Amino acid sequence: MADRVRVFVSHHHSPDEDAFTDRLVADLEAVGADVWVDNQRITSDDFVKKINEGLTGRQWLVLVMTPEALRSEWVQAEVNAALNQVRGGRMQGAIPVVATPCDEAAIPPLWAPLHRYDATRGYDSARDGLLHALGLAMLSQPALKAAPPAIPSTPVQYPPSTFPPPAVPARLATLGYRGFNITGAPAYLPPLITIPAGRFLMGSDPSRDIHADKDETPMHWVYVDEFAIAQYPVTLAEYDLAVRSGFCKAPPGHYWELDVQEAPDRPVSDINWDDAQQYIIWLVSVTNLRGWRLPTEAEWEKAARWDPQASVSRRYPWGDAFDKRRCNSQERNKPGNTAVGAFRAAFMRPSGASAYGVEDMAGNVSEWTSSLYAPYPYRGDDGRESMQAARVEWRVLRGGSWLDDADEVRAAKRTRTYPSRRESYYGFRLVLASGAGA
């Protein structure tokens, strides 16, 4: 096996620069590079020793070029040390990647001849140019150009009903919902889409998204096991069966029976986190499928924005540019939620679906996740997925609602509140854990 490409990454520390560097390092490591980067803010006392150790055996230096980096004495020392190594034949080269526009006059004369890749004109093209220069282009190609997972017409098959299933409201039937009756208690089950196991980039890169909030950074790689997610949020018709059973209470502020009769395909709202958990308990009991639950933050975000074909995380489910025709947000100037699936391409409008085919993940109703609110990077084993947490701790909602504007319905946007709080624009969708059966 050929030796790994060994890279030293030089950068100046700031929240924005660290976020860009984290993304670049993750991309380099994803295609097999061995990367050394200072993540611990080396102090002046051990700078020379640590940098010498870091440069030893490295083939390349990659500079994250910003105005602050050009002014940093530490960055200057790192790059000049690498250039000395290059002149002595001990390194192959130094390559700047421009993360923020720089004044040409501020670039040191010895650095000016270095070929630069300008990420301010497009991160992906700059990254691909860097990979090619490092000899990693062929290694990166499979990961960056992998075929998207097929989305089946009937995404996940449920077991057959034991008892006669209930008739599904006509509109929901056209979306793929089915009646289910295995215990003698009827339920409506949503179409589910399987999201394959694998890594995706979670969070925001402020260099690409000026609306990125601090709690969305740094952008980082997260591995998610396979799961199946409902193609649509839970509807009034679905929730009504739990209400009729006496297990769940109708949300306040509704003429419940009239709402269900007139708009069974609208998402249920005025739901708090506890309501969602109660519905899930009911659904498990009447379907004997133990895997029903809320999505984690990471699962929700991967289903909403990861494009497996391009290996990028989109700002919105459909792409990076906002389009009010693809979602129910404040820009439509039509208060209230819309029927689930209203922004499918089948309805002669641009599709609002994610790359995986999941619908209604921008606007309409803000969706509860299972996750406690905690800083990034996301780790599913650090306690944020605890179901025993105190009820005063914040849980996370995702997706924004019909009350929110374009910035608030971005797929990386995080909202948090107490699990007991309910609003007219809070709803939820379901996940069925992979392999969870009766």
Image (cartoon, rainbow, N blue to C red):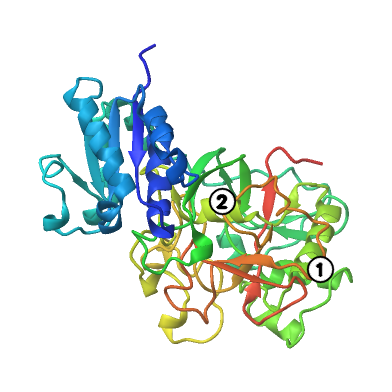
Image quadrant where residue 273 sits: bottom right
- Label 1: how many Cα within 10 Å (few below 14, some 14–19, many 20+): few
Q: Is residue 23 above or below residue 211?
A: above
Secondary structure at badge 1 equals loop
Q: Which residue has dot 2 on it?
A: 377
Q: Nearer the viewer, residue 264 or 105?
A: 105
Picture residue at 40% right of the left edge, 53% below the top:
13
Observer-side mark, 2 or 1, equals 2
Q: Is residue 145 above or below residue 303?
A: above
Q: Say which quadrant the C terminus sits in.
A: top right
Place of residue 186 in the rendered image (x, y in percent of width and height, measured from the top left): 81, 60
In the rendered image, is residue 3 in sight?
yes
Q: Which residue has dot 1 on it?
A: 391
Place of residue 10 in the rendered image (x, y in percent of width and height, measured from the top left): 34, 42
Image quadrant where residue 112 sits: top left
Mark 1: amino acid: Arg
Q: Nearer the viewer, residue 191 or 353?
A: 353
Position of 272 with respect to 56 (left or right) is right
Q: Is residue 405 above or below residue 143?
A: below
In the rendered image, is residue 125 in sight?
no
Cα–Cα gap, marks 2 and 1: 23 Å
Secondary structure at badge 2 equals loop
Position of 83 with respect to 170 (left or right) is left
Q: Say which quadrant the N terminus sits in.
A: top left
Place of residue 73 in the rendered image (x, y in percent of width and height, measured from the top left): 30, 49
